[in-house]
Amino acid sequence: MAGSIFGKIFRISTWGESHGKGIGVVIDGCPAGLPLKEEDIQVYLNRRKPGQSKYSTPRKEEDAVEILSGVFEGKTTGTPISMVVFNHTQRSSDYGEIANYYRPGHADFTFDAKYGFRDYRGGGRSSGRETTARVAAGAVAAIILKELGITFTTYSKSIGPVEIDYNNFDKNEINQNSFYMPDKVAAEQAGEYVSSMMKQLDSVGGVVECVVSSMPKGIGETVFDKVDANLAKAILSIGAVKGFEMGDGFLVAKENGSYHNDAFYYDDNHQVKKETNHAGGVLGGMTDGSDIVFRAAFKPTPSIASNQHTINKMGENIEVSVRGRHDPIIVPRAVVVVESMAAITLLDLLLENMTATLDGIKGFYKN
Amino acid sequence: MAGSIFGKIFRISTWGESHGKGIGVVIDGCPAGLPLKEEDIQVYLNRRKPGQSKYSTPRKEEDAVEILSGVFEGKTTGTPISMVVFNHTQRSSDYGEIANYYRPGHADFTFDAKYGFRDYRGGGRSSGRETTARVAAGAVAAIILKELGITFTTYSKSIGPVEIDYNNFDKNEINQNSFYMPDKVAAEQAGEYVSSMMKQLDSVGGVVECVVSSMPKGIGETVFDKVDANLAKAILSIGAVKGFEMGDGFLVAKENGSYHNDAFYYDDNHQVKKETNHAGGVLGGMTDGSDIVFRAAFKPTPSIASNQHTINKMGENIEVSVRGRHDPIIVPRAVVVVESMAAITLLDLLLENMTATLDGIKGFYKN
Amino acid sequence: MAGSIFGKIFRISTWGESHGKGIGVVIDGCPAGLPLKEEDIQVYLNRRKPGQSKYSTPRKEEDAVEILSGVFEGKTTGTPISMVVFNHTQRSSDYGEIANYYRPGHADFTFDAKYGFRDYRGGGRSSGRETTARVAAGAVAAIILKELGITFTTYSKSIGPVEIDYNNFDKNEINQNSFYMPDKVAAEQAGEYVSSMMKQLDSVGGVVECVVSSMPKGIGETVFDKVDANLAKAILSIGAVKGFEMGDGFLVAKENGSYHNDAFYYDDNHQVKKETNHAGGVLGGMTDGSDIVFRAAFKPTPSIASNQHTINKMGENIEVSVRGRHDPIIVPRAVVVVESMAAITLLDLLLENMTATLDGIKGFYKN
Amino acid sequence: MAGSIFGKIFRISTWGESHGKGIGVVIDGCPAGLPLKEEDIQVYLNRRKPGQSKYSTPRKEEDAVEILSGVFEGKTTGTPISMVVFNHTQRSSDYGEIANYYRPGHADFTFDAKYGFRDYRGGGRSSGRETTARVAAGAVAAIILKELGITFTTYSKSIGPVEIDYNNFDKNEINQNSFYMPDKVAAEQAGEYVSSMMKQLDSVGGVVECVVSSMPKGIGETVFDKVDANLAKAILSIGAVKGFEMGDGFLVAKENGSYHNDAFYYDDNHQVKKETNHAGGVLGGMTDGSDIVFRAAFKPTPSIASNQHTINKMGENIEVSVRGRHDPIIVPRAVVVVESMAAITLLDLLLENMTATLDGIKGFYKN
């Protein structure tokens, strides 16, 4: 399989299966001189750690990250940063049964179609556990962006049919509830909804929204490597994501130009501002100085304990119920995954942008 | 600017500005032995040609493609295929005025933010005219896919508030109306809606849907180069696209697992089938043998003749009205652009997939 | 065929066959703001133009370059720069004969082995004419490097058995003789040698040497993208090159460490200097501030008029003599090709190096 | 630092420093279905293990490889293969002294010039230990090539002034002497030479030659990704290599076309053969079916115990002698590194070649 490398300058190479020895990532192209220790990364990993609420799998995974290279005396050296989270609680025996049939909504069938066989334990490489490596790398990217003043606000915008009310938006609430929702009331309603679906042995989808503040203007490349294009790839590459939108997103299809176009104006300090931000912070693929706003739609967890039709490898139509310790909803733990992929993507474009003008290059090499 | 190269094995490199000498593309990695002539490509280009209906700019552009290399005695040789559409009707004088202000909804401002200046004539590189090169390359990709039995059905799903009714779906209708809609009634309603908006000097958005049939199973890479991820990048890289979704798309956020999961079954010929296709033809980033179904949301044309607030380079808040020969809606001419980007993306993954297994490689080199 | 794209940030995509419509290149990632006109590039192209001496093919090719995009009001805009040299003197009829046999030393046989057929006219894509595109792109890279104070001295070090004498080294002589040798006496001897080989219907090889001055220190990446590694690929990708060496090159195999190691010292102005430059300006793949010095070995022109054994496609062992207007030696016209590939390679690494440290990034975005 | 990723389809990402926690590599794009166990790779790693003769550092490194992912039930699954060799014998205390000065012939100075500081322990990332990761990945590539019938013969061609005599060439001798020379007499002379240099506290260079047999015809891409170009980059990326040549290499500069051109003929079985192989198995960058033959020139080990001039970071000119457990010659342990890099390079081109023709693609997808 190809395709486990992402990025152009800040490039990550991830590896690992759900029930293998561990999950890891190598970052090639990380700038030197960044203060970095395992604790800094652990903060991000803890946001996706399972077993933290009753709406999450009761599996206990410590997910403790180890840095194996690229850091010396507390700072990145410019050499590749290898990080690993060793697996400790692989109960492979749980999975013997699924070796022989194809779980609906999972990659079991397509894996076999491509390779002829698969590591069936816990979904193998197609497990949600794969995102651990994305978060470890994303943490490094996010920390660098923070050094440049760029910050993220990422949260669940909807859980099943329950949406946040922007009138109740409270940033501080995000880390206070199990769903990472910035609206306490909505979070409570979401809890009730998810509980009722759990009783029905069913699972729930939702939407993650991400707002990036203080990106410099003019970042992104005009044609194929637009900010929006690269973000879309990054986000759709996360398992279970089925949709991506920037700014007004699919609503634009019903808007008119007179409404959609964001009017520019100079504010009192003679700074360029926009009256609205329907565009979500990009014009022609490049950042316009407004907040970057995008959303990802997550499907409901495919592993459900209720009965489903499917097939086995022996050529039979069968009925299955996927037992095990599964999250009833992917969204809350995916919030930090979305943020991580966005951080990696935006940092990469920021780095590339340094080479955009001759004056910038001359200025750099004069110093 | 970087970012005008797309693809890994079948790679395209595009160039050209709206009012420069022409628009072109070089394809690197096109397989040898494909019968190819300019007429084959022209068929695709004609689908995005302006001036074909009253809902399209009255500009006349012949957009005649020339093949400059890579074809010998009627067949591709394996060497790079360079194609160009020379510009003939550049009326640069139209654009002198916009050199000094930033049109809302356009890349004028971000271009200047990035580079300090810009080719302001007709949007320069950020013109919709840039997509000519994508269609020329996409035609080649689509023709190769056709040789492998893979086909596309691409159409407007909605024009402003007017949506097609799947009960009226008629594939043959697509090329019969100005909107490339597969529903004659909807197309007529769309015409009325667009006409009324044109009278108001306003513009309209919409949604393009694409269905890809007969893709082999197992195509796509499991982590970052998922079919959906690569398609999302390809589609969001088209100017004016603000959203992308696979299968049920954003609806999945409100679905439950018991509904969303597509059940597998063996049909009477012992072929693997799915009872539904909520996934849109991919599982874990790899094709599952069903139709690939995705959608793109297009914003309304940013160039509108009604008054808008904006700023000029002299530091003033001003009012403008963008005159000129602009489409009131981007969608109809974008249908073939969406198809082209999808063809390029899927062909590239098909080629990469040839290297997936040792048995496949051995089989190949035994011949 | 893949493989006509080169570079990571400053990327070039070349196309064209010897007897097709033209030869061209698209540069993606060229910084904006560089004053550039066709005349600037023509200067470089003229150095590889045929027909300038009796040791070069009498074919007349104007090789006039046209810029088709990426330049506006005399400056690069940051968008792709498309350049083309149209072919005017294709006498395809000359080549009908070679369609059916394989010229020794040429790519005829390997082309057929790979693709099953080939554009046989003048070597098709494997013609020396392909390097026109490299020189056009290399000219742009070299002009940018010049803006940064980086300069090239490139010349023939040997022509057949005739080597320059460094005691006679005269930089100004390089452009005064047909062989671009920096030693007038050697150039005369080379002329005699080449003339005598021409009389014998034979051809001659040689060595090109390139010295790059004033590169900043620390350019290049430590592992796979070493300056030397990327230069080696660039140079070996030129048809007819069979060897590459940095600094002392193959001589190092017989040297001892006490001799080979270049001792550092601080000069009177407290600048870091080296007592010698056996390394050729790189240590650990990164520039050390000394001149970068490398060499390329060129084989003799494979097209010779004397009789050679070979085979035809009909399964017969035959004898051929390759007639036509061929250079008796590749080296003189290749001097500028070597310089061009070096310029592209070094500029690309200079651009990538801008992202090497957090302090550098912070400094850049503070401005 | 960027540049620790190599390859296009079979891509490797390496990491690790001499005195960090370990050295590792992730292979992305390895085909599924290859039987693979740690012992298979260990065989290759043992060829570069130190401490095996008196001409090698007496450091004991077990260099035991662990596979962390990508292999399930004894076969590669198509997912990334992560391999690590943990460091056990880091005696960092040895290196405190060199933190403050720049060893001649090492990357100490250039590292500081690029990043402002460095991991000085044992050369950090620029240590020869970095090649461990190349060999682990190269072993996998070589094993795949072997499955396709492609084999390597790699050996020391010269050690200092001592060259092998091709009349005495004995393939079986290669693994019988400390220098991996295919000539017993030369190996003995080399031993005497190296011993005498060791007594003088000096070090020795040499040449490695590699012969690749049974590569299919037509592999390699015609322009930038020629077999020779990609090999050159791969080989020059190995620390201490200063020169690369294919076939007759630098000798071609003095050859004439009538001598250099390899004549084709049909042998008695109607197979295409060449009377000679001056080209080293490639024509126009593509394999011609003959053995691929290339050479790499290695400089003498830069760490020598005799006195050398250099500078320290405090601005002083000083004298140093680099003590420690260093190899007096790099070449013998580098033989397998050269082979590894060649295997990775050739496999990658073999994979890419599968997509070269429409007929090949159609044939593949028909199965």
Image (cartoon, coloured by chain):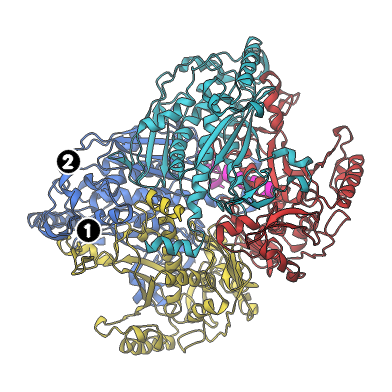
Chain colours: A blue, B yellow, C red, D cyan
Question: To which residue does mark 1 refer?
Answer: A105
The image shows residue D144 at horizontal and vertical percentages of 43, 42
Within 10 Å of the Cα at label 2, are there few (<14), some (14-19), or many (20+) other Cα atoms?
A: some
In this picture, is B275 found above or below D97? below
Q: Is D127 left, or right, of A257 in this rendering?
A: right
Q: Are marks 2 and 1 in contact (CB under 8 Å)?
A: no
Q: Is B121 left, or right, of C35 in this rendering?
A: left
The image shows residue D191 at horizontal and vertical percentages of 61, 15
Residue stretch in magenta: C341-367
The N terminus of chain C appears in which quarter of the rendering? bottom right
In this picture, is B319 found above or below A270? below
* Amino acid type of the residue that numbered disc 1 sits on in the rendered structure: Gly
Residue C307 visible here? yes
Earlier sequence position, callout 2 versus callout 1: 2
The Cα atoms of the two marked residues, 2 and 1, are separated by 21 Å
Residue at coordinates 89% horizontally, 55% vertically from top-left? C54
Q: Is residue D126 magenta?
A: no
Residue at coordinates 52% horizontally, 78% vertically from top-left? B40
Callout 2: residue from which chain?
A
Residue A261 visible here? no
* Nearer to me, D352 or C312: C312
In this picture, is A31 found above or below C140? above
Q: Is residue C357 magenta?
A: yes
The image shows residue C289 at horizontal and vertical percentages of 69, 33
* Nearer to me, D67 or B230: D67
* Amino acid type of the residue that numbered disc 2 sits on in the rendered structure: Arg
Which SS class for mark 1?
A: loop
Q: Is B332 left, or right, of A116 in this rendering?
A: right
Callout 1: residue from which chain?
A
Question: To which residue does mark 2 refer?
Answer: A59
- Per the picture, the main secondary structure of the magenta-coloured stretch is helix
